[in-house]
Amino acid sequence: MIAGNGLLDQETCQRPILVLACACNLDNENSRLNTAIERLTGLQWRGQGPAFLVGLGHGATHWIIASFYVLLPFIAKDLGLSYAQAGGLITIFHTAAFAANAGSGAVVDISGRRVLVLSASLVVGAGALMAIGLMEKIFWLVPLVVLIGITNNTWHPAAISYLSISYPENRGYALSIHSLGASFGDMVSPLAAGAILLWLTWQGTASLSALPVFAVAAILLVFLPRSRSAGKTESEPRLSLSNYLSRLVDLVRDRAIIGLSIMSGFRLMTQNGLLVFLPLYLVDVMLVSPIVLGVAMMGMQIGGMFAGPIAGILSDRIGRQPIVFSSLMATTVIIIGLTMISNITLFIIIVALLGFVLLAVRPVIHSWAMDMTPDEMSGSTISLLFATQSAFSALVPLVGGIIADAWGLSSVFYALAVAMMAANVMVHFLPDPR
């Protein structure tokens, strides 16, 4: 504007300067934040993009199975399933995941096509979840649960080896981002599924929940950089078949790797047991609504989201063993405490604390395995680790269901605490290369 004296209005003159000053201050704040993140993690902020993309994909795999966990109580009621039969579906899932490990690590290490494997596993899992929405008998659910199990354990050898090779000096942090994605998927999916269940049947909820996973698969295929290691692109074979088989024999003879896998099997048995029986406990014992169920399961994952990066960074600096031991011991105590709580608000708070200590060790254990393994066998090491975990986890839904039918759901939590204590004991006997 022109003032009466022919001069520009002072406020009008100053406005662009103020906007520019605010923009500069915002840039400075972002720069300081990025610098703080780089100092804390030891990685440049721009170089962390692939880790977050892989973490997004990991979240999609957990979105699939977490959706099924939330749907399971409603599937069981609609189809008239006992606790043992409902648990049997999850046993089938873990059995299929166990079988998938027989070839997934070899495919990753020999072909090196990690990004393609990651995208394909998401497409198969999303297709299976969508098809579950069309099924009305348990017989037809079984092959779809098998496909979801295959998806779950096809993902991990490719993803974890990709991140291990891409971030060799910061494995704990990089794999904590991978774990962060899992916690995000496990957190958002129950809440979303619980909300959708207020409007749709479990069949419609299953089909609708599959759509975001297809989108993530496309994002990874287009935007995730192809990994490089020792001058080789991921399209080039890493090992000959004979060389691979020779190294595989050495791998299964490594007592440290086998011990770590068994310890991790006990831990994941407990985690998956909680994911199966916490929803059943909340619905059948505490009589909560679907939305409260979603909030409770989300709280567990929120705790894990905060804990994973903290544990990963600390393990890069002080070692893997102390982080794992302290987390597992706290988990044992909290699981027993859950059975003594009747107030739903306090129960949800304690479940969030449980997620904080239980899920914190997930990236640390994976990093521990990668510390013991040469890059060219990283996919197979993860296959061995997850095969052991799946073998242990396959027992807990069925056995837990039998225990729940005979002695009540609270008894299942005591059994899970015993399994966690066994993992604690094993930690003392494992070497820590860090």
Image (tube, rainbow, N blue to C red):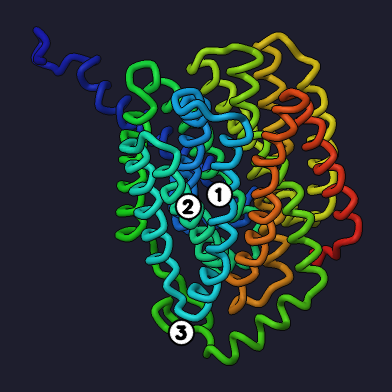
Residue 307 position, x and y percent, is 67, 38
Q: Which numbered tag is attached to residue 92?
A: 1
Q: Which quadrant would the N terminus be assigned to in this image? A: top left
> In the picture provided, is 293 more to the left or to the right than 321?
left
**Residue at the spot 42% in from the left edge and 27% down from the top edge:** 192
Does the CB distance between marks 2 and 1 fall below 8 Å? yes
- Is residue 177 among what the camera can see? no
Q: Residue at x 56, y 67 (%)?
A: 161
Q: CA distance from mark 3 to mark 2?
A: 29 Å
Report which residue position mark 2 lands on. 146
Q: In the rendered structure, which amino acid carries the disc numbered 3?
A: Pro
Q: CA distance from mark 1 to mark 3?
A: 33 Å
> Considering only order in the chain, which callout, 1 or 2, is on the residue closer to the N terminus?
1
Q: Secondary structure at mark 2?
A: helix
Query: Could you tell me how far apart the alpha carbons at marks 2 and 1 are, in whole angstroms?
Result: 6 Å
Q: Residue at x 69, y 17 (%)?
A: 347
Which of the pair 149/331 is nearer the observer? 149
Question: For the residue carrying disc 1, how many other residues have a C-alpha within 10 Å: few (<14), some (14-19), or many (20+)?
Answer: many
- Quadrant, the C terminus: bottom right
Q: Is residue 74 above or below residue 4?
A: below
Residue bearing the label numbered 3: 237
Nearest to the observer: residue 73 or residue 351 = 73
Q: Which mark lies nearer to you, 3 or 2?
A: 2
Q: What kind of residue is marked 2?
A: Val
Using the image, determine if residue 293 lies above or below residue 186.
above
In this view, the residue in front, 58 or 203, is 203
